[in-house]
């Protein structure tokens, strides 16, 4: 597992400067617009997309054929992508959280508690996005998977638009609190189900 994670990390090292520049840009944008959610959202999604980038490199280099000739199980290859993506998201959250606290303290735009809730929600959505997309990428490949990625982005937007049109109103405070308590359990279940599906797809795949 460690070797696979290092391989993916070295694959992305050329893009390290780009990520740092984007972090600086979104930090500046956040201070300018007093919008904490922008920085946390974009950085979290960049980290969620990182495993997709490594999959694209693997596919172009036919790395899977080489990897399967070594004593590496297919299950380990699949799990490494999940671990890589989730670890990056958690690291980004650890970086963005104190930066957001500094911005909120400076701008006084919202309470610290509200800012932390936004960060947790955004990173939870990033992990959910990763869990939905990875099985599709393992099944259809990166090129078709990118098209499906846009569809996945579109579905929540369409849902919000329809919800507003129907004008059902916002859920109660008690409902929000209940969803907050249940969301970590729900997220863990989704990730585990996604892992099982991806492993089964990859085990049946021929290279």
Image (cartoon, rainbow, N blue to C red):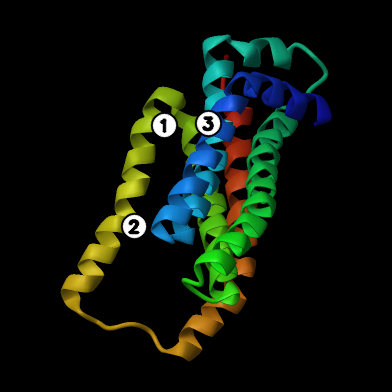
Q: On the rendered structure, is 41 left or right of 84?
A: left
- Quadrant that contains the C terminus: top right
Q: x%, y% of residue 99?
A: 62, 55
Please name which of the two marks, 1 or 2, marks the residue nearer to the observer.
2
* Residue 132 seen anywhere in this rendered image of the structure: no
Please name which of the two marks, 3 or 1, marks the residue nearer to the observer.
3
Circle 3 SS class: helix
Task: Look at the picture and state if 106 lies above or below 68.
Answer: below
Give the Cα separation between the discs numbered 1 and 2: 18 Å
Residue at the (64%, 16%) spot, across then down: 64
Question: Which sits earlier in the primary sequence, circle 3 or circle 1?
Answer: 3
Label 3 with label 1: CB-CB less than 8 Å: yes
Residue found farthest to the front: 106
Q: Which mark is residue 52?
A: 3
Label 2 environment density (alpha carbons within 10 Å; few <14, some 14–19, many ≥20): few
Residue at the (37%, 47%) spot, across then down: 152
Q: x%, y% of residue 185?
A: 64, 68
Task: Look at the picture and state if 121 lies above or below 134.
Answer: below
Question: Which sits earlier in the primary sequence, circle 1 or circle 2?
Answer: 1
Residue at the (28%, 65%) spot, across then down: 160
Q: Which mark is residue 101?
A: none
Give the Cα separation between the discs numbered 2 and 3: 20 Å
Q: Which residue is mark 2?
A: 156
Q: Which mark is residue 145?
A: 1
Residue at the (33%, 40%) spot, across then down: 150
């Amino acid at each position: 597992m460690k070797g696979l994670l290092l391989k993916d990390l070295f694959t992305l090292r050329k893009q390290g400067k780009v990520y740092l520049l984007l972090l600086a840009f979104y930090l500046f944008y956040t201070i300018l617009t007093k919008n904490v959610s922008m920085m946390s959202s974009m950085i979290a999604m960049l980290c969620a997309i990182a495993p997709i980038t490594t999959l694209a490199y693997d596919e172009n280099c036919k790395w899977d054929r080489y990897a399967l000739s070594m004593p590496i199980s297919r299950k380990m290859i699949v799990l490494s992508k999940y671990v890589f993506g989730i670890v990056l998201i958690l690291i980004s959250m650890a970086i963005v959280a104190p930066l957001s606290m500094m911005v909120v303290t400076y701008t006084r735009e919202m309470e610290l508690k509200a800012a932390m809730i936004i960060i947790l929600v955004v990173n939870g959505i990033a992990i959910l996005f990763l869990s939905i997309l990875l099985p599709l990428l393992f099944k259809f490949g990166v090129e078709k998977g990118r098209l499906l990625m846009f569809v996945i982005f579109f579905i929540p937007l369409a849902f919000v638009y329809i919800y507003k049109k129907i004008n059902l109103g916002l859920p109660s405070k008690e409902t929000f609190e209940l969803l907050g308590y249940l969301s970590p359990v729900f997220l863990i279940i989704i990730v585990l189900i996604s892992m099982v599906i991806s492993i089964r797809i990859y085990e049946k795949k021929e290279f």
